[in-house]
Image: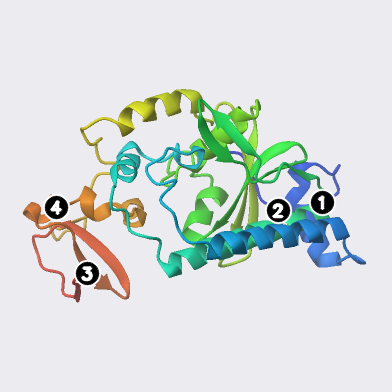
Amino acid sequence: MGLPVLTFTYEVNMEQKITTLIPDIHKLLTDGKEGFSERNIQEFFQALREDIEEFLSPETRDNKGRLRMSVIGKHDRQLWYEFNDKKKKPISSQLKLRFFFGNLVESFLLFLVQEAGHKVTDRQKEVVIDSIKGHIDAKIDGVVVDVKSASDFGFKKFKHNTLLHDDPFGYIGQLSGYVQAEGGNVGYFLAYNKSTAEMTLVEIDELTMIDAKERIADLKKIMNQSDIPERCYAEIPDGKSGNRVINKNCTFCNYRYECWSDANDGEGLRVFDYKHVPRYFSHIEREPLVEELLL
């Protein structure tokens, strides 16, 4: 069973509620309006100020090694590494900028949501399940919504209804926790494609959600066990060469090198440059005829 996906690129006349959100934003952008709500713009400026303060604040280790609602949907092995990493590297300046601009886009989207006539409440409200805390992005028209600013690769998972079967970032688990902490049974993703400016609205319901309370109980045990959980994804044959590469989803993980330290007979992952796109080899029978990236 797939996720219901609501994608609109044209104007429709319906009662204004969350299911009309995308066409209502398009109508606002196409038709324009005289002036804007002073309250809405002040809320946007306040969100921007908070984003800037967080962006420029020194990084602390307070949240490292601590289970948070935003990560409960991630794979066991990835979370085990994150929880047990005592020498976690600081976030790079490039990654901090990506996070900041993502937050900026999300704040502006909520401003557009309001200007399109929809009600936005409970911004960054703290929610808790069994002492595990999280912060929802907002409720739109009374429903919990998680706003995602995504790459083209990530956006396609929302648009093409594949997130249920391929969710390497744990988005469904994250939203499940937020919705269930608020006593609801339906939530939405509002996803924005950073490459094309396309938007889509995706509903998740009780049949799609995970049981956040049960998941948190399991993770509390997994995080403290000495044995590393099994790998999230199996390696993949690289054509007919006899070589093998790691799954594309693994390439986004900060712990790919630790996870695959036994690759290539204990040498670890070997990385080659394919038209400026790194490809991570776990086993090599035939040397690739491209430059190897030495790490």
Q: Position of residue 220 (x, y in %)?
A: 37, 28
Q: What is the secondary structure assignment of the residue under circle 2?
A: loop
Q: Nearer the viewer, mark 3 or mark 2?
A: 3
* CA–CA distance in space, label 1 to label 2: 9 Å
Q: Nearer the viewer, mark 3 or mark 1?
A: 3
Q: Are marks 1 and 2 in contact (CB under 8 Å)?
A: yes
* CA–CA distance in space, label 3 to label 4: 15 Å
Q: Are marks 3 and 1 in contact (CB under 8 Å)?
A: no
User: On the rendered structure, is 129 left or right of 218?
Assistant: right
Q: Position of residue 179 (x, y in %)?
A: 61, 32
Q: What is the secondary structure assignment of the residue under circle 4?
A: helix
Q: Nearer the viewer, mark 4 or mark 2?
A: 4
What residue is shown with label 4? 263
The numbered dot on residue 272 is 3
The numbered dot on residue 2 is none
Q: Position of residue 68 (x, y in %)?
A: 47, 39
* CA–CA distance in space, label 4 to label 2: 45 Å
- Inspect the image, locate mark 1, and give the three-letter code of the amino acid beneath it: Val
Which residue appears at 64% of the width and 27% of the height? Answer: 185
Which residue appears at 29% of the width and 31% of the height? Answer: 224
User: On the rendered structure, is 59 left or right of 275?
Assistant: right
Q: What is the secondary structure assignment of the residue under circle 3?
A: strand
User: On the rendered structure, is 122 left or right of 134?
Assistant: right
Q: In the image shown, does 76 or 279 lie closer to the viewer?
A: 76
What residue is shown with label 2? 8
Q: Position of residue 148 (x, y in %)?
A: 58, 52
What residue is shown with label 1? 12
- Inspect the image, locate mark 3, and give the three-letter code of the amino acid beneath it: Phe
* CA–CA distance in space, label 4 to label 1: 54 Å
